[in-house]
Image (cartoon, rainbow, N blue to C red):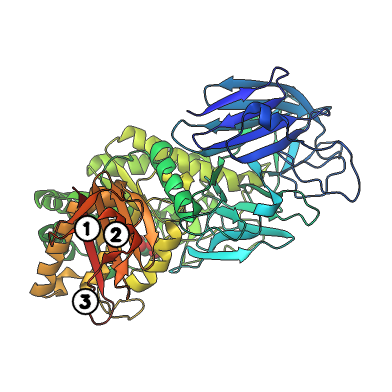
Amino acid sequence: MSQVSTDAAGRTFLLTTPATSYALHIDADDTPRHLHWGPRLTLRQAAGLTAHDGRTSSFASTAGDELAVEGGARFGVPSLLVRYADGTRGVEWAYEGHRIDGGRLDLRLRDRHYPLEITLGYAVHDDADVIERTVTLRHSGAAGDAPVEVLRCDAACWSVPAPAARRLSHTVGEWSGETQLRRTPAPYAETVFTSRRGVSSHHANPWLMVDAGDADETHGEVWSTVLAWSGSWRITAARDHAGGPCTVTGGPGHEGLSWRLQPGETWRTPVFAGLFSAAGFGGTSRAWHAYTAAHVLPHPGEERPVVYNGWEVAGWNVTEAGQRALAARAADLGAELFVMDDGWFGRRTSDAAGLGDWHPNPERFPAGLGPLADEVRRLGMRFGLWVEPEMTNPDSDLYRAHPDWVLHMPHRRRTELRNQLVLNFARPDVAEWAYEWLDRLVAGHRVDFLKWDMNRAFTEAGWPGHPDAERLWDGHTRGVYAVVDRLRRAHPGLRIEGCAGGGGRADLGMLARTDQTWISDNTDAVDRLAIQHGYSQVYPARTMSAWVTDSPNPQTGRTVPLRFRFHVAMAGALGIGGDLTRWSAAELAEARELVALYKTVRPVVQFGAQHRLPDAVQYTAGDRVVVIAWGAERELRLAGLDPAARYADEDTGSVHDGARLTSHGLPLGLPKGDLPSTLVRLVRR
Ligand code: GLA
């Protein structure tokens, strides 16, 4: 049971989750101070921990604030930076009181003098050790009062005990090489993880883990934080040489932006969630997977379909005949959803034109999309389409009609990336336009699935004529969320895949309103191993779209056996993206078998607990265990099994003792040759 409790004075608070505790205290000067985040403590034990000793000095550590502000003797990273109309900056805390509602705690604070209310929000759930935090700002002045300028407002500042904060884990990446896991010694300094691109980005994913340097997949204490936000963001880790805790403060936006909170206005950050686990990185990931399923995804319990997508085959050369031919082969292999990617609309025969003109290309689809959609359904599959609603090509009817709808600044070039510009979704008229055509498209063709793409970063991010233009950085993301949410409400059967040039916007903000993520444009199964490994640190397998494409891989040129390609893609939500019209009969037959095999293990892979093993990944759900292995290991020690139970191999019939599988390993019998791989299905007897 998770719960929130407080002492008689209402100044010490304890959040209790199934395995952890989090405690904080309101100091004598009304500053909210951190007490504890880690293994379980009682309220009495937590209250006995000393918060700040009250002495200030120019030289001592000042870490340990629940939300670091400017003001007084504070010299660390501020989580909240504000400026009032008279030039005064920062916050002097005044505590107003608290509200506890089930697993929610709101601490109501304000500035001692200026009209700014600041609510620190906490929420815990019965089935997770994740603590969700937000900050809400409210301008409490009257109409006509001056606004408050906001230069930074993070959602939370997390404190990790100093001795435990020696190493940082995070991901780096690039287009086609996203989510590369890195573990680095924590510098005695401020380390900034950020995206200034308007999307969460290929280059860094908005999460950070801290440990003492001794955690591994199965053991050790890990403090992890994940920001549920899809726009620009920033997480700053500060390791304190003077003995204070390591602080991890994070929220939406990047440095240098500012905007004004108007009288009467309330603004809330997205969630910056934290999790303490004593079960190593594997336990940490499983806890995030379970939390994402229970509290983030719209339809966690639904099996993700086997997708066919012809992007790598046709590119922009989409024809109805070509799509029909692919659809027939895809259905024959067992695909359940056929997605037509880019190139079906407007004058979209290359990346140079057409974005914004969302009607079927009349030369390619003279009778509209109906006949293809009908054919796809006749073949027993659902029908999906690629869209990129936030974009326009200058060579489009939309842009010719509304050149002011894109992000731009007076006297500045409109930098084109992939020949396209970003539509400002913070504008209500743009968001309304997008909703209308999406609604019409989905309703008109009974579209079951959208791949929602976003292929470029923001540049010249201005909003001429708007009195507070930098709000667009926040407003664009919220505008996208609102359109997606409204579309889903209007079409409850619609499913959505998030995509941004591959994995440029893979985050819990998007996962709260999408069903899966296209995590990379790189479909080379060997490259994919590292990308999937990084993605799995936080995000669950059921959301990880993975296609089997051609060999040699069209992008990397690497030759990879069909089985290996399948096995790697079967570790997530399997899809197929190869040119099936050129696969041999033998390849098609093998693929058909592997798709059928995937369907038998799908509930275990998509809903099971995931253990990352050396050159392998294991999924366990109830009595069933699925192991996908590659590399050279001969015996693989499995995880999380009942040592007293026996496990039967569903394919060979051999029976193994749980204890032996965990201590000595499962004999893999990997075939010889290049890139061997195997999939083993075990069932507990
Ligand atoms: C992006 C996506 C690809 C594909 C193309 C289409 O790069 O990541 O999968 O949809 O756009 O232009």
- The residues tagged by marks 3 and 1 sit, at their Cα atoms, a distance apart of 20 Å
Q: Amino acid at mark 2?
A: Leu
* Residue nearest the viewer, comparing 398 with 244: 244
Q: Amino acid at mark 3?
A: Pro
Q: Which label was assigned to residue 671?
A: 3
Residue under pointer 1: 656
* Residue nearest the viewer, comparing 275 with 484: 275
* Residue nearest the viewer, comparing 654 with 199: 654
Q: Residue at the spot x=46%, y=64% of the render?
A: 178
Rendering coords of residue 170 (x, y %): 55, 59
Q: Amino acid at mark 1?
A: His
- The residues tagged by marks 2 and 1 sit, at their Cα atoms, a distance apart of 7 Å
Comes first in the chain, label 3 or label 1 = 1
Q: Are marks 2 and 1 in contact (CB under 8 Å)?
A: yes
- The residues tagged by marks 2 and 3 sit, at their Cα atoms, a distance apart of 20 Å
Rendering coords of residue 291 (x, y %): 44, 41
Q: How many marks?
A: 3
Residue under pointer 2: 661
Rendering coords of residue 84 (x, y %): 81, 36
**Does residue 623 appear left or right of residue 503 in this picture?**
left
SS for dot 3: loop
